[in-house]
Image (cartoon, rainbow, N blue to C red):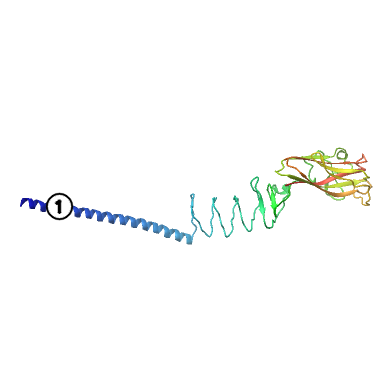
Amino acid sequence: MIVERGRDILQRKKKSNNQRYIYIYILYIVIYKTHTMIRASIALLLIVNAAYAATTQNVVLNRDVKLTKSFTAESFKASSMNVSGTLSVEGEVTASRVKAAMLTADVVETGTLSPKAGDTIIIEGDLELSGSSDKASQGVSFLEAQELVLGGTKQWRIVAHDTFNQDTKGWNVAETSTCGTSNVFLGGNCQQTIAKKGAEKIYTNLPTHSEIRLKARFHFLDKWVDGDTAYAKINDEYAWIDTPGANAGKINVCGDKHPEAGLSQLLDVVQTHNSNTVKINFGAFMSENDACKQSWGVDDVEIYVK
């Protein structure tokens, strides 16, 4: 009897403990579910708020953002953007500087095209340059490149242009003249020094190249006779020689009473060259020692490389 009573009491305690455990478990589930629902509600609220902001105003992020997938937007503005893959924009891209391994566009409007040293700018369509490329008026050239290739062919790049309108910087003589117009050139009538010693200049800091081109306009002033010869040298080697012969013209525009043997005779020579400096010389072998009776001048000296 006592034993059965004891078993009955033990069974009631076990049931009581089991019920307590069940209540605790139900309470835990309620708390966990409630917390999860709160978190989900907050996340949903953030998503709705972001979606609302995206449709009504700009989204401003004041920290770095890293995207490993794609990003699509009608417009995007950032102080800087680094894309390791491909950037495709259907509209316009406006930036103070764009740096890319390869850039493909229907239209590129820029103040300066400047590739890295050794790289090449390839233009398959038309190249339209607006404005001046005169370094004296603009400070820098519009197009800066080590090489310019159009239609698969390397193009000449002008690196120096002496007009003598302002100065004779770099030349060993400073004698200038005009002849019939206000255009100024180096040398001329009665300029004894250049007539005797010639004109020379060394151009430095040439970009990397394999060929050099010299262009200029040469003036044969006053009386020249058969055998009188003018020349241009590149690095002390004759690159251009001209013998105008005896005067056959009847036009006298400057200097002595004799007509000019020739004005603005174009010289244009190309040589293999790869040094970053080049020496240019102009001179003449003349039968007359007096520069007031026979003289010469040179203008628009241009140096090109490619």
The residue closer to the viewer here, 76 or 280, is: 280
Tell me the element at label 1.
helix
Is residue 188 visible in the rendered image? The answer is no
Residue for badge 1: 13
Residue 57 shown left or right of residue 275 in the figure: left
Outermost residue, left side: 1
Q: Amino acid at mark 1?
A: Lys
State whether residue 109 is above or below residue 238.
below
Pinpoint residue 60: horizontal percent, then vertical percent.
Answer: 49, 54
- Residue 199 shows in the view: yes
Depth check: 286 or 212 in front? Answer: 212
Left or right relative to 94: residue 250: right
Report whether 151 appears left or right of 280: left
Could you say where residue 178 lies in the image, as x and y percent from the top left? Answer: 85, 47
Where residue 34 appears, as percent x and y from the top left, is: 31, 57
In the picture shown, does residue 35 fall above or below 199? below
Q: Residue at x 22, y 53 (%)?
A: 21
Expressed as whole percent of the image width and height from the top left, the position of residue 275 reads 73, 40
- Front position in the image: 193 or 262: 262
Residue found 10% across the figure and 52% down from its top: 7
